[in-house]
Image (cartoon, coloured by chain):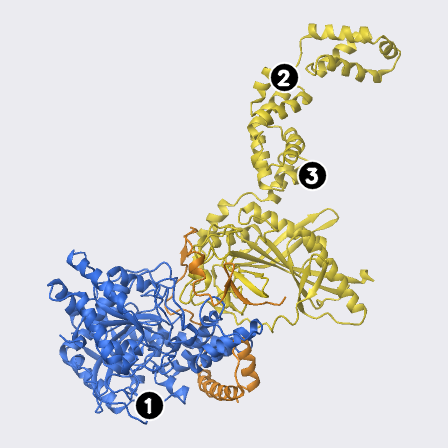
Chain colours: A yellow, B orange, C blue
């Protein structure tokens, strides 16, 4: 029965910006401070206080708009959204309504088991966050206004997504972009990137949308998927039973994995938006946009493409290495010092990611810097050490911070390429394994691997494997 | 009538004001008279007129993204009708 | 010199010549308040102790030769300005216990100058009123006749200056709230161009219309006080970053050759004949001073009250949402839920006029009515503003009456809000256009009530109107008359 229905999803994402100060006052935006310690007359909504716009918030909005292919409005205004709630100090939220700063953008999504698709972005606007409500033991509610007036971007998509998987792909890409841009820390647990989903279903073939429910409180990709799946199933069941979906706000309960109606709690929405007379219109010149465009970092999609096309990396490598900006920066710094992209990629995706995961450090804190790692790769390519020895060198560098050359010298890890020295070892190996020699000579070619291994072992890994191979062949065929 | 008691009750709800039956009646009458008066604006054709939000045309007032000292929790709560644990306390919000 | 003759310019001279001290004149003001304010009710909060302390500090500063223009001058502030540590009620029960933790920018500027703040002055609740009768502290009374209103909303400020309780005062003007009480009390009041003076820390009524301005005994004081408070403030996005001229220095430039426009729509039926006579006489004074009086038209004047009562109430309905009993102010809650707390707090805390305006503004913004009312009013505002722009292409300033009548009797207009609103017809257009205007005394009715003359200037043309006002003041002696205050309140009108 499920297959008769098509799911339609539109997303509203709140992106908390990483500015040092709040959007309309100079209070700090730092997370987790003691209640009401980061407040002033403006964010407390005291009588007479006035907002002044943080320019960095506008810069962040323009950056995000450009990165999501939006048109940046030359003229936009702030509006007041009027409603009463204890976490909303002024009795209105300063937001943008008519004339937002960014409009008409899009993101291309792709992924395993997903057809490539373009998701439209209706608008991006700037607004202030509300404070926090807690409950106390005495049966009241407590208001902490540290978060009030923290800058947010609201990114509103078109209802273009047709499955939870598409919604997740869109969200992951948006998340990646805002983190790449440095406008958001991306921390979903702390609420820096949170999402409301508008979900509806309709029979396949129907052109008009079904009635939608808005699901709130989605602060992890997993919850978003769960909530959408639950909501789709609920709506289909309802329709199949002859019922009707009502337009309403629903809250996702992560413990129960269900969405619940918030009906009754809210009065009719009549937000009485009007232009905020305390703030001036915002005019963004072409020059301002150009300046920001010029300073935009290369975005993940562009990087992925470049890694494939210019560096010749496989799609998988390109996608892993471009997923996070610090990792991409590490990789690019390495390639800049050692121009063998595939070797670099193998090492970053193998040793480096493995080690940082095992040691629980971030890529930026990786003790084997791109410079040190390039030192290792160089010694592999000039045959000073083998790939295997290189791995020991890597962990020594991790421990000591010394250069590859220092460690190779100290530990005498230089490959043995002296034929005389190798001949002696080969003699020993041949003498010690008469049975295998006979079998080899009898046609069992596979035993070559065994002889190479024995020689490498006897040389403590320092022998040059290519050379050993060549010498062994000569000696055994003699 | 420009406005009914039902409209006035709805608006009072939005504004979080409660009106006694007498107040509702008086308010409806007074608002009706005022709305009747402001209807004179419709004598003017304003089709091609741009609305004025600010009398002095200006744009782009900004502050730099610099943290300035907050006023401190004591000042923040100085006028609080009720406070608990450095927070403003209100009757329980039902979710 | 009696308290009611003190002026800023006069005191500066006396301080300099060490003929008196700030402490002495402050004490003189405090005594005057004590002897007159039981009747006049101009003060909501007195700051005697703090005032004397500040005065003593000012005297030290004066002695050290480190004085600023206003050091040691006793001033009063409308109770709409946030004053750190001093109760600020905005004329409302809802802020009965509110003690600000910060100073408004203008207050900060005055404190830096060493001004002595004597107290907080009575006003209509949240500046919504034209008679001071909506104040939670009861109306201030007109010192010229205690049976009459002082005007509003800065009624207490005009009363205190007229009655010699302070040397000068600050008020705010959203639709005439400085000019109309100044006219009714026979003093000088100036509403600056929108953006000229910071609104930071001034409790908002209608943000796109509110401006702070001086109420003084003469034009020179007005120039001095405006100079002290004007100027860009980074905390107010709508404040304009343009230099503040030396208003006092240009006062004496005269009006010879100046073109003064007489807008025909301000000389209409309904204008009290006594007011008309006084304004006509003022026109002749200007003619005598060499000004060129020319008729002009502000064709949309008649729509300004309707336009104003939509825009001002819409903004107010939102501005007053913060009075919710959560963070400050008087909370009323009988143990019910959150919505009960909101409704009880706001219903008990706001007076009838404030509720009426919140309701009207909420309605004008509500779903389905926004375009018909709010946007329509903003469009008409454009037309009204264009009227002024066109008029100022022809003339340097405009001359009009301040109000259609002199001060009316207490209770006369309280029953009919619309009639009360219409009494602001000559002052409202200036706020909608965002330009500057002032009121100066230009005569008296037969009953002895002062009449005000309004001079309207171009945006940021405060210097022009001050100059014209000073020339008029030199040629007349209306500003020298003082209320005798010997009339007793009527039994039946109180």
Of tags 3 and 2, which is closer to the observer?
Answer: 2
Quarter of image, res C457:
bottom left
* Residue name at image x 54 percent, y 75 percent: C334
Q: Position of residue A154 (x, y in %)?
A: 56, 58
Disc 1 with disc 2 on a shared chain = no
Mark 3 highlights which residue?
A316
Name the mark nearer the viewer: 1 or 2.
Answer: 1
Specify few, some or many for label 1: CA neighbours under 10 Å numbering under 14, 14-19, or 20 or more. Answer: few
Chain containing the residue with disc 1: C
Residue that appears at 58% across and 62% down:
A136
Residue A384, numbered label: 2
Secondary structure type for disc 3: helix
The answer, for residue C401, to whether it is visible in the render is no
* Label 1 close to label 2 by CB (< 8 Å): no
Structural crowding at the residue carrying mark 2, measured as other residues with C-alpha within 10 Å and reported as few (<14), some (14–19) or many (≥20): many
Q: Position of residue C263 (x, y in %)?
A: 29, 81
**Above/below status of A349 relative to C289:** above
Within the image, what quadrant is residue B79 found in?
bottom left
């Amino acid at each position: 029965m499920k297959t008769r229905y098509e799911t339609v999803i539109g997303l509203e994402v709140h992106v908390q910006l990483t500015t040092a100060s709040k959007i309309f006052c100079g209070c700090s935006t730092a997370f987790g401070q003691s209640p009401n310690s980061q407040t002033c007359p403006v964010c407390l909504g005291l009588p007479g206080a006035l907002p002044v716009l943080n320019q960095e918030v506008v810069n962040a909005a323009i950056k995000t708009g450009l990165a999501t292919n939006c048109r940046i409005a030359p003229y936009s205004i702030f509006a007041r959204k009027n409603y009463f709630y204890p976490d909303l100090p002024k009795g209105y939220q300063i937001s943008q309504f008519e004339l937002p700063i960014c409009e008409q953008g899009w993101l291309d999504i792709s992924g395993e088991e997903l057809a490539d698709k373009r998701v439209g972005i209706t608008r991006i606007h700037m607004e202030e966050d509300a404070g926090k409500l807690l409950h106390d033991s005495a049966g009241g509610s407590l208001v902490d206004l540290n978060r009030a007036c923290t800058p947010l971007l609201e990114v509103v998509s078109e209802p273009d997504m047709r499955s939870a998987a598409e919604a997740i792909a869109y969200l992951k890409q948006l998340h990646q972009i805002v983190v790449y841009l440095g406008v958001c820390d991306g921390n979903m647990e702390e609420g820096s990137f949170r999402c409301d989903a508008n979900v509806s279903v309709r029979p396949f073939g129907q052109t008009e949308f079904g009635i939608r429910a808005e699901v709130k409180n989605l602060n992890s990709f997993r919850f978003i998927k769960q909530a959408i799946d639950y909501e789709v199933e609920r709506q289909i069941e309802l329709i199949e039973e002859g019922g009707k979906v009502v337009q309403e706000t629903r809250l996702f309960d992560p413990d129960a994995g269900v969405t619940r109606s918030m009906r009754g709690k809210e009065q009719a929405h009549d937000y009485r938006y009007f232009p905020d007379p305390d703030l001036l219109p915002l005019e963004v010149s072409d020059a301002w946009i150009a300046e920001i465009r010029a300073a935009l970092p290369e975005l993940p999609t562009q990087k992925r493409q470049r890694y494939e096309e210019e560096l010749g990396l496989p799609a998988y490598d390109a996608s892993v290495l471009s997923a996070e900006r610090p990792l991409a920066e590490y990789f690019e710094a390495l390639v800049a010092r050692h121009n063998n992209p595939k070797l670099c990629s193998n090492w970053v995706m193998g040793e480096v990611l493995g080690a940082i995961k095992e040691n629980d450090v971030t890529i930026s804190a990786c003790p084997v810097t791109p410079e040190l790692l390039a030192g290792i790769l160089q010694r592999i390519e000039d045959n000073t050490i083998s790939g295997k020895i290189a791995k020991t060198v890597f962990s020594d560098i991790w421990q000591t911070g010394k250069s590859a050359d220092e460690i190779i010298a100290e530990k005498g890890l230089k490959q043995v390429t002296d034929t005389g020295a190798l001949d002696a070892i080969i003699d020993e190996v041949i003498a010690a394994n008469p049975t295998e020699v006979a079998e080899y000579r009898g046609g069992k070619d596979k035993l070559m691997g065994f002889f190479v291994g024995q020689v490498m072992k006897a040389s403590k890994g320092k022998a040059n494997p290519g050379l050993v191979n060549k010498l062994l062949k000569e000696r055994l065929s003699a | 009538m420009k406005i009914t008691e039902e409209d006035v009750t709805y608006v009072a709800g939005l504004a979080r004001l409660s009106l006694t039956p007498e107040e509702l009646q008086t308010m409806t009458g007074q608002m009706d008279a005022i709305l009747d008066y402001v209807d004179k604006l419709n004598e003017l054709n304003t089709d091609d007129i741009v609305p004025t939000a600010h009398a002095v045309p200006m744009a782009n007032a900004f502050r730099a993204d610099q943290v300035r000292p907050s006023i401190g929790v004591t000042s923040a709560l100085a006028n609080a009708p009720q406070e608990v644990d450095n927070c403003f306390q209100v009757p329980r919000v039902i979710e | 010199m009696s308290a009611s003759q003190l002026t800023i310019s006069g005191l500066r001279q006396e301080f300099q010549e060490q003929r008196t001290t700030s402490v002495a004149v402050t004490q003189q003001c405090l005594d005057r308040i004590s002897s007159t304010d039981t009747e006049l009710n101009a003060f909501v909060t007195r700051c005697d102790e703090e005032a004397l302390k500040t005065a003593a500090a000012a005297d030290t500063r004066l002695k050290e030769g480190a004085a600023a223009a206003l050091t040691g001058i006793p001033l009063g502030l409308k109770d709409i300005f946030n004053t750190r540590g001093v109760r600020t009620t905005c004329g409302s029960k809802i802020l009965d216990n509110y003690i600000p933790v910060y100073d408004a920018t203008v207050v900060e500027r005055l404190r830096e100058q060493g001004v002595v703040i004597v107290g907080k002055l009575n006003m209509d609740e949240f500046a919504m009123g034209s008679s001071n009768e909506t104040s939670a502290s009861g109306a201030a009374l007109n010192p010229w006749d205690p049976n009459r209103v002082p005007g509003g909303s800065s009624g207490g400020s005009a009363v205190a200056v007229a009655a010699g309780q302070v040397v000068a005062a600050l008020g705010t003007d959203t639709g005439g709230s400085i000019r109309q009480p100044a006219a009714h009390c026979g003093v000088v009041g100036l509403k600056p161009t929108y953006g000229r003076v910071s609104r930071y820390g001034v409790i908002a009524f209608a943000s796109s219309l509110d401006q702070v301005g001086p109420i003084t005994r003469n034009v020179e004081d007005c120039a001095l006080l405006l100079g002290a408070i004007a100027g860009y403030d980074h905390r107010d996005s709508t404040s304009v970053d343009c230099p503040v001229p030396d208003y006092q220095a240009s006062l004496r430039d005269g009006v010879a050759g100046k073109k003064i426009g007489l807008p025909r729509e301000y000389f209409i039926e309904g204008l009290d004949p006594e007011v008309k006579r006084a304004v006509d006489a003022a026109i002749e004074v200007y003619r005598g001073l060499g000004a060129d009086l020319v008729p002009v038209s502000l064709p949309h004047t008649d729509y300004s009250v309707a336009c104003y009562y939509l825009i001002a109430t819409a903004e107010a309905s939102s501005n007053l949402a913060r009075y919710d009993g959560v963070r400050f102010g008087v909370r009323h809650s009988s143990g019910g839920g959150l919505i009960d707390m909101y409704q009880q707090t706001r219903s008990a805390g706001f007076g009838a006029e404030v509720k009426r305006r919140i309701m009207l503004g909420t309605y004008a913004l509500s779903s389905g009515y926004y375009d018909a009312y709010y946007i329509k009013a903003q469009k008409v505002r454009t037309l009204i503003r264009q009227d002024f722009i066109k008029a100022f292409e022809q003339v340097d300033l405009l001359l009009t009456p301040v109000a259609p009548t002199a001060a009316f009797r207490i209770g006369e207009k309280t029953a009919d809000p619309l009639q009360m609103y219409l009494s602001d017809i000559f002052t409202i257009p200036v706020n909608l256009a965002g330009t500057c205007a002032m009121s100066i005394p230009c005569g008296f009715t037969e009953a002895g009530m002062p009449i005000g003359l309004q001079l309207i200037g171009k945006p940021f043309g405060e210097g022009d109107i001050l100059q014209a006002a000073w020339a008029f003041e030199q040629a007349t002696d209306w500003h020298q008359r003082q209320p005798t205050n010997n009339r007793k309140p009527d039994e039946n009108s109180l």
